[in-house]
Image (cartoon, rainbow, N blue to C red):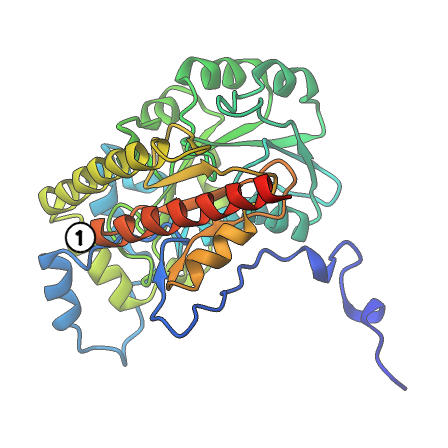
Amino acid sequence: MALTPSRVIRGHIEPESAYHRAEIETGGHPPVRLNWNESPFGLSPKAQAAYDAFHTGNVYPAIEQAELRLAIARYLGVDADRLIVGAGLDDVINTLAMTVIDPGTEVIINEPTFGVYRSLFELHGAVVTDIPLGDSPDYALPVDGIIDHASERTRLIIVCNPNNPTGTLFDQEDIVRIIESVDCLVAIDEAYAEFSGVSHTELADRYDNVITLRTMSKFAGLAGFRVGYGVFPDALMPWFRRAAPAFFNISAPAAAVATASLDDLDHLRANADRIVSERDRLAAALNALDGVTVIPSATNFLLVALPGPDAMPFVSALAQEGLLVRGYDDPGLRHTIRISIGLPEHHDQLVAVLERKIASHKEGIVAS
């Protein structure tokens, strides 16, 4: 007898709903990945030394990850006992979902935002409700809409600030109004906090329904090591800790490198300053192109509106030069691309390709 999916697969899981990103053909050029919001810089000196010195792969990691959590606690100025760490921020969000989501309960998000939220919480059986952001270029947070919609069924509201993919930094006062008006958890995903100059840690200290989420993939350049973390309400930690996996899913080398990185903050902050400076330079160069509008960003990427209703021809043209940027199928973003901040020479090449493509696009419109 053939085994059918309905016999063994949870009924709410749809195979098409998984979050994924496909690579694109680069015309034989080595790919320059300006599409995944990675750091263009390598490990900090102390992190590199920790990686080079690692020789104990035969031994399990520290089961409580105490040294890593203490290093993060010192960095944020919080109690280490309130920290959940994981193999990337997705893993921490998964622990959050495992702890608070019953099938049929609600999570509120604000699209366009990080695509993992919808796919991950739906995987756990949540009803994911979108209260959309305002129109471009402001992409305002719909504070009243969130508050009015929240109900007893709502377990979690997740606000990405600064937001991915728009780069928008919402006013903290608006987030506080949500926190104070709802009877559920509010998670603030501040994966890009180090580029914005804004931290919400004090909100996690002030309110017992606030979680703040961060990653070391962007600021510390540890995307390949997968280390994320969150500050959780102290009163709920026994339940969150019960749902967290053994070793917090962090490998021993990843823990060593992440801990050493947090002892190299001057280096990391200098890199962040370089990224912000280059972000602003690139934004100015792009805004000077005909028909191009750059959305103001507080992150390590830019969302860029291009001429015409569909940006995919521009994505393909850049890819043929080896420059990978993010394009979107979402109708509200189809005219945009997202560009991660990399190295100046790659940005100069990108601007030149876009300028040529825009000129040919305009000639085609005139000819037709």
Place of residue 207 in the rendered image (x, y in percent of width and height, measured from the top left): 43, 21
| Residue drawn at x 77%, y 54% as measured from the top left | 12
- Closer-to-camera residue (316/180): 316
- Mark 1 belongs to which amino acid? Ser
- Closer-to-camera residue (349/208): 349
User: What is the residue that sits farthest to the right in this orientation?
Assistant: 1
| Residue drawn at x 40%, y 75% as measured from the top left | 28
Question: Would you say 266 lies left or right of 111 here?
Answer: left
- Where 68 falls versus 270 (above or below)? below
Corner quadrant of residue 259: bottom left
* Disc 1, SS: helix
User: What is the residue that sits farthest to the front in this orientation?
Assistant: 367
Place of residue 68 in the rendered image (x, y in percent of width and height, measured from the top left): 25, 52
Please indicate, yes or no, whether residue 291 appears anywhere in the rendered image. yes
- Closer-to-camera residue (68/31): 31
- Closer-to-camera residue (234/137): 137
- Where 93 falls versus 153 (above or below)? below
| Residue drawn at x 36%, y 53% as measured from the top left | 34
Disc count in the image?
1
Q: Quadrant of the N terminus?
A: bottom right
Q: Quadrant of the C terminus?
A: top right
Corner quadrant of residue 52: bottom left
Place of residue 297 in the rendered image (x, y in percent of width and height, measured from the top left): 36, 31
Question: Would you say 272 lies left or right of 141 here?
Answer: left
Please indicate, yes or no, whether residue 67 appears anywhere in the rendered image. no
Place of residue 76 in the rendered image (x, y in percent of width and height, measured from the top left): 25, 35
The residue under label 1 is: 261
- Where 125 falls versus 332 (above or below)? below
Label 1 neighbour load within 10 Å: few <14, some 14-19, many 20+? many
